[in-house]
Image (cartoon, rainbow, N blue to C red):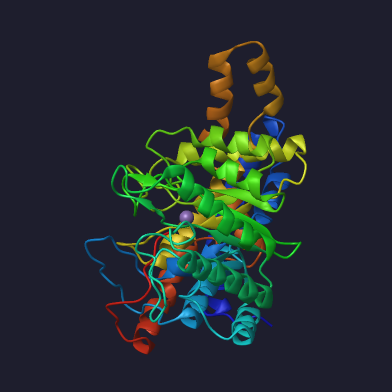
Amino acid sequence: MTESRIAPDLVATDNDKRAIALKADYEALGATLARRGVDIEAVTRKVGEFFVAVPSWGVGTGGTRFARFPGTGEPRGIFDKLDDCAVINQLTQATPNVSLHIPWDKADARELRAKGDALGLGFDAMNSNTFSDAPGQAHSYKYGSLSHTDAATRAQAVEHNLECIEIGKALGSKALTVWIGDGSNFPGQSHFTKAFERYLASMADIYKALPDDWKLFSEHKMYEPAFYSTIVQDWGTNYLIAQTLGPKAYCLVDLGHHAPNTNIEMIVARLIQFGKLGGFHFNDSKYGDDDLDAGAIDPYRLFLVFNELVDAEQRGVNDFNPAHMIDQSHNVTDPIESLINSANEIRRAYAQALLVDRQALSGYQDDNDALMASETLKRAYRADVEPILAEARRRADGAIDPIAVYRASGYRRQVAAERPASAAGGGGII
Ligand SMILES: [Mn+2]
C-alpha cells in the first residue's frame, strides 16, 4: 500500500466537486475530435501512460549566481525530497520516477529504495557531479574534470561516475547522465583537440563500466560555467561522443542548453534519424539556460518537439524509447507547484501532438502546400486538451485540479513546521 502525503479523501472530495463539469467538457471535446476522426479515448489512454521523471534537485528552491531566496519547508535532504516528489506524483499521476544527483542525494541505497517503495516512487537516470568540488576531495575541478590536464583529476572524476553507476544499480536505475562544466574562459587557455581527446578517453572508461542494460547519456550545453569554450557545447559534438563511445551511448537534449532561436525540434529529428536520441531535460527559456518551467515561455516550441516524438512513435522507429526528465530551477514559485504544472504542460504538448492529422500533413508536404501544412500543426496545437489531461489524472486517482488540492492540503505549512528554515542546501542547476 502506497503511503500518501496528502489525504486521499481530500483528493476525492475535490474531484467530486469538479466531476460534472469535467464530464461535460470531456464529452464536448470528444465530439469535436470525433468529427476530425480522432478517438478521444485513445488519446486519453496514451496521455495516462506518459510519464516524466522529476529531478530531486528541483524540489528545493533554486537560485542564481547572485542570490538564492529559500522558501519555507525546504527539504533537508533526499528523504524529504522524496516526500515532496511523492506529492507531485500523487496529484498528477505523471511523475512516478525521481532522478537523483550524486553526491547531493547520497544515502544508504537500501533505505532509499525502501522509502521509494513506500511512496510508490522509482529511480530514473543517475546524475554525476564533477562541476563542483565535494568537501574533502583530493583534486579540484576548478580547471575541469573528465577533460582536466592532470591525469589524477581525470581519474577521480571517472571514479565518481563509476560510483554513481554502483549506487544506481542498487536503486534499480538504468541510466547515467553526464554533464560536465569543463571548458575555458579565454582564447588560448585550452587546446580544443587535446581537451576533447582527454574527455573521450575518460568517457570510454566510464562506458566500459556500464551494465549491458544501461544507457549513458551525455548532455551538451553551449556555455556556462565556461564562457569562451565548452567541451560538449552542442548536439554535433554530443553526437560525435555517442558515436565514438558505442551503442549504449546517447545524446541528452536539455531544451535550455541552446542559443536563443535554435531549431531544437530539428535537432531532435536528426538525433532520432540516426538512433542517438537518449532523452530530454525539459524546461523553458527566454535568453539562455534560464531553467524556467516547461511551456512557460514558448509552449509552441514544446509542442513542435513532441510533434517530432509522436511522428517517430507512429512511424515505428526502431528502439525508440527516449527518457523524459524535467530539469528546472524554481526561484520564485513553490517548487512543488512548478513541477506539478510542468508535468501537466509536458503531457499537454504530447496530447496536442497526438492530435496532428499526419496523413493530411504528409500530403501537404508532398504538394508543397506550406500554408496548409502549417495550419495542420496549428489546428492540433490550438485544441484545448485540458479535459483529456484532467480525465487521465482522475482515472488514475490523481487530482482533476492538482494545484487547488495542493493548496487546500496545507502540505507546505505542515512540512515547514517540521523542517527548519535553511539558507543553504543544494540548489544546483544542470
Ligand atoms: Mn540539464
What quarter of the picture does the N terminus occupy? bottom right
Q: Position of residue 72 (x, y in %)?
A: 31, 77
Q: Name the residue nearer the viewer: 94 or 159.
A: 159
User: From the viewer's perspective, is residue 416 above or below residue 301?
Assistant: below
Q: Position of residue 262 (x, y in %)?
A: 44, 34
Tell me what residue is drawn at x 40 percent, y 70 percent: 407
User: From the viewer's perspective, is residue 20 above or below residue 58?
Assistant: above
What quarter of the picture does the C terminus occupy? bottom left
Q: Position of residue 285 (x, y in %)?
A: 38, 45
Q: Position of residue 186 (x, y in %)?
A: 28, 46
User: From the viewer's perspective, is residue 64 above or below residue 8?
Assistant: above
Residue located farthest toward the left when viewing the structure as drawn: 66
Q: Is residue 52 visible?
A: no
In this rendering, would 345 be left or right of 176? left
Tell me what residue is drawn at x 61 percent, y 67 percent: 97
Q: Is residue 202 visible?
A: yes
Q: Name the residue nearer the viewer: 68 or 128.
A: 128
Tell me what residue is drawn at x 67 percent, y 61 percent: 395
Q: Name the residue nearer the viewer: 92 or 244.
A: 244
User: From the viewer's perspective, is residue 103 above or below residue 181?
Assistant: below
In this rendering, would 337 be left or right of 228? right
Tell me what residue is drawn at x 60 percent, y 50 percent: 279
Q: Name the residue nearer the viewer: 337 or 321.
A: 321
Q: Count numbered badges in the picture.
A: 0
